[in-house]
Image (tube, helix red, strand yellow):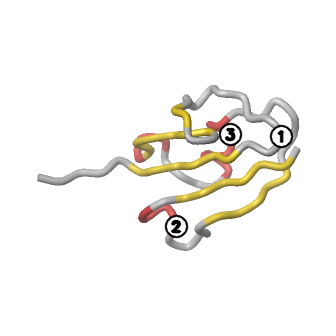
Amino acid sequence: MQVQVKLFAFFREGRFKEEGRELADNTIVGQVIDDLGIDREEVGVLMINSRHCQFDTVLRENDILAIFPVIGGG
């Protein structure tokens, strides 16, 4: 299945801003994050098609997965 992956902030460093990926059916969000070499502890917000999701959410054909890092500040 085809899924669009969007990365934000420092997750883009050495990777990409947006990329289409061919994934196996029943792939979960956490697998994509692991495949990208992103530490799950650094993930702040996950969204599929502009709706919040979890690491164990199953991706579907033509989904848009957005991955945002934890943002600190003061």
Q: Pointer 3: residues within 10 angstroms few (<14), some, or many (20+)?
A: some
Give the mark nearer the N terminus: 3 vs 2.
2
Q: Pointer 1: residues within 10 angstroms few (<14), some, or many (20+)?
A: some
Residue at horizontal 61 percent and vertical 69 percent from the top = 16
Q: Position of residue 63 (x, y in %)?
A: 73, 42
Give the amino acid at mark 3: Gln
Above-or-below relation of 51 to 15: above
Quarter residue 9 falls in: bottom left
Q: Which residue is mark 2?
A: 12
Give the amino acid at mark 2: Arg
Q: Position of residue 25 (x, y in %)?
A: 87, 34
Nearer to the camera, 39 or 8: 8
Q: Which residue is mark 3?
A: 31
Above-or-below relation of 13 to 41: below
Tell me whether the residue at label 3 lies in contact with that at label 2, contact meaning CB atoms closer than 8 angstroms: no
Q: Position of residue 72 (x, y in %)?
A: 23, 51
